[in-house]
Image (cartoon, rainbow, N blue to C red):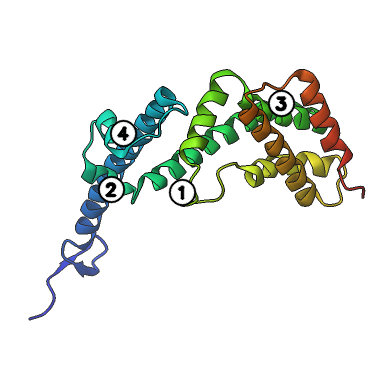
Amino acid sequence: MGENLVTSAGGEPTPAGGDVASRIAQRSLAKREAGYANEIRRLLDAALAEIRTRGTTARIRVADVVAAAGLSNDAFYRHFPSKDALLGALLEDGTERLMGYVTHQMSKETTPEGRVRRWAAAVLSQATDDIATTTRAILWNAGGPTTDFESGPPLPGSRLGGLLRPALAELGSADPDFDASVISHATVGVLTDYLWRRAQPTPDDVDRMVAFALRVVTPA
């Protein structure tokens, strides 16, 4: 028998129900994707809450995260093969938030020097108060060598450096990519030191970081 056909508005035959089937499938996939995204967010938020509660006194457990999220073990392992994978995702989620915060702070300035200063101040601000406590606890939980990071190392030096590149180019850097990488990794290193010493950077510390950044700009 021939293929079951219907006639389109333009008179051309098309497979019966073909477009309808695709649309229904796409709607079903969209609903499933939205449901999965909701599950992942609940697991990330629950893990963060557990980490904040425990600090560096005890590492979180999958069972506690699942219970706090109100989900099942099946839901957890549908998205994360292990606790390490969850911690890696949690660090990446924090990186996204930090990138947004630094970008917003830099947007308040009109000069390249001002943007470099805002960048340095925003990065070093992660060593202050509750932010530092949470960051330390996350890094402590993720301290094992098997932690799974989907898109890079736990501290976002390279990505933060990308935000600096336009300002450094405007300052006349002959190699803004290299300069941004050096400044970013140096600043993240200083931030890490503050975190583990439980110290908070002062305005003078930010001034020194900015002065360092401007000094290392490669001359044209």
Q: Amino acid at mark 1?
A: Thr
Residue named by callout 3:
121
**Residue in the image at 49% along x and 39% along y:** 91
Earlier in the chain: of badge 1 and badge 2, it is: 2
**In the depicted structure, whether residue 81 falls above or below residue 107:** below
Q: Where residue 199 sits in the image (x, y, percent)?
A: 66, 22
Mark 1 crowdedness (10 Å alpha carbons): few <14, some 14-19, many ≥20 = some
Mark 4 crowdedness (10 Å alpha carbons): few <14, some 14-19, many ≥20 = many
Residue named by callout 4:
65
**In the depicted structure, whether residue 152 falls above or below residue 61:** below
Left or right of residue 56, residue 27 in this image: left
Please identify, in this view, whether the residue under mark 2 or under mark 3 is nearer the observer. Answer: 2
Distance from label 1 to label 2 (Cα)?
16 Å
| Disc number for residue 147 | 1
Earlier in the chain: of badge 4 and badge 2, it is: 4
Distance from label 4 to label 2 (Cα)?
12 Å
Left or right of residue 121, residue 86 in this image: left
Q: Residue furthest front?
A: 57
